[in-house]
Amino acid sequence: MSGLNAQIDAKSIPAHTHATQKSQMIKRLLLLSICLPIGLSLLPVSGAETNGQPHTIPDLQKAIESVLKETKTPGAAIVIVSRDKTEWLAGLGKADVAADRPVTADTLFRLGSISKGFVALAALQLSEAGKLKLTDTVRQWAPDIAFVNPWEATDPVRLVHLMEHTAGFEDMHLREYALNDPAMTLNGALAFGASSRVSRWPPGERMSYCSSGPAMLAAVIEKVSGLPFDAYVQTNIFNPLHLGASYADTPDVERRRAKLYRPDGVTPYPYWYFGLWPTAGLNASARDMANYLHFYLQRGSFDGTQLLTPASIGRMERGETLPAAKLGQFASYGLYNYQIPYGPFTFHGHNGATMGGIVEFAYLPDQGYGYALMINSGCYAAADRVANLIREYLRPRLTAPPLPPVVAVSDDLKRYYAGYYRFISPTMEWAQGFHQVLSGRILTVTTNGLLISSIARHKQLMLPVTDRLYRAEDTALPTLALLPDKDGHTRIQSSMETTFERIPALQYWALFAGFILVCLLVISSLVMAPIWIVRRWLGKSRNPGPLSVRFLPLASAALLAAYMGLIFLGFHGVVTGRFIDDTSLGRPGLLSLSIWLASLAFPLSAIASLYVAWRARHTPMKRAPYCFSVLVAVAMTGTAIYFGYWGLIGLRFWA
């Protein structure tokens, strides 16, 4: 469930894991804009603290147990492997708190979005067998799966677009995540969520994390192979890799799996029957992950059996459809397998998150090491800290490659790309209005490179590896690409998931200034309201004018604050980094209905406040309070129009 993180994505400068990137991105933008879907785009952020480098397995275990205790994480399973050997395989803490059942190497955890990788393996096997091509269109194999692509005649949605999240679809809507029906079939779940699958740009132009893509591909695999997807994977992947993994919630799985816990570390979540189960529904153990890691480190081979060629594994580890991929080696999302810059090293792998659980696996093909961690808590901080401890433990065993040399780049080219940029690849379209204000980038020229910055973060120096690809000072993998102009638009790509388009400086600053003004007016209205009410009640307000002139602007400001506060409440888990919010917003309920009603009441009150202020323009009253009321009414009405343009009026997360 990486789209509700997953959405449930993220996650590159300086080095760190995709889990850190994704969680930090979500927390930052939600905190600033008070709303953002879980899932999704990546922003450069700092790595989590490691509290010192553990040098031995006992030191590492002690440090991890300390993190689990501090974060109220009941249990964890850890595996560290070299190319041909399992270095450490351990269960720590409790799989079931109430039953006092410990985590072991064979305890099953929900893998979340790591499940996607097995869909890619199946597609690559069928490709090697000549039964399909990654460039085949979705319509060719599954014309019954509903989606909309306005560019289908010239730029069709291909299987590879589903695998690299470049089809242009939104991530699954919250109603799809909330679908918790054990009897729901894969085709039924795909039909249920058709509304989220609309290409917003030509496929291959930008990346936007989409968890429905793997389920679509699984349906294609069923048609190509003639087998149910889980049967195909069991026979051709699980059995050769000796995995005890399962998509089903059988009595044996229930007996072996860890319960997933809320932030208190005591209250478990009920089992979640994910409708699009090939995307995020797999249960597996740390022992399973050890074999899975060996398979990648041995380049498609395991226990003497070659399941995939090294070339297919290499293709899985790199993206090819985005414009940045055509410029050279760049931090990319491959076939449900992405690159993770970590100083001079580049890990490969994926992470997964569900309500009450986070899992991550990562490996270094050239160095021959890998790890997996599984926790039964949705605490991002816990997962980040444990991952950093493991990487710091591995660091002395690795041979650092040299950083790519800095090349000379024409000042004219750098100046051409300098300027202000807006974010244009949102995971969820409803959040785009907030992205426009707070997710932009500023690119400025330096003597040896470029500075990339935004309103919300410090400047980051980027050094040229080629004339169009740039890396951070301490990382090897480029994470900034200057894209060739297209249709008169100048664009950059920052890390794998975020594409930006240049806009006039006036537009950039006007949006931000408007945001600040609205915030100040809302705060001042709420602060002044009690004073005004008391003064009016005591009869000390002289010539106050009509009550509606003061009340309606105040009401619209209060409703805007309530609207934003309710959205914040719905996503407060990812804002704080303490847990992954549940799927309640995807169903009609008290909170989701309150958000919908507030999104309707706010614009109505804003328009009404402007109307009464206009009608009272000649009414004798104090001019200063009247002018303030007019200013609030105008600002609230302008905000309502802006919200209406970006689809934030009548927001129904269950629709």
Image: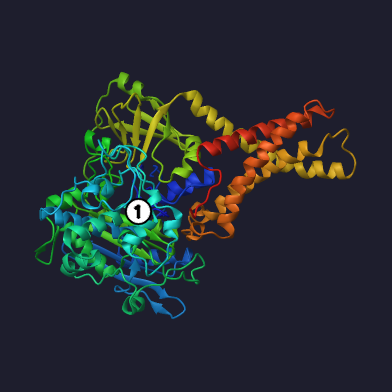
Rendered position, 47 above or below 403: below
Q: Quadrant of residue 135?
A: top left
Q: Is residue 9 visible?
A: no
The outermost residue toward the right is 539
Q: Are there few (<14), some (14-19), or many (20+) residues within 10 Å of tag 1?
A: many
Image coordinates for residue 46, horizontal then vertical, percent: 41, 45
Image coordinates for residue 304, horizontal then vertical, percent: 9, 65
Residue at image location 22% in from the left, 70% down from the top: 243
Q: Amino acid at mark 1?
A: Ser
The type of colouring in the image is: rainbow
Image coordinates for residue 651, horizontal then vertical, percent: 53, 48
Q: Is residue 600 left or right of residue 220?
A: right
Front position in the image: 155 or 343: 155
Rendered position, 407 above or below 131: above
- The residue beneath circle 1 is 211
The outermost residue toward the front is 144
Label 1 sits on a secondary structure element that is loop
Front position in the image: 632 or 605: 605
Q: Quadrant of residue 409?
A: top left
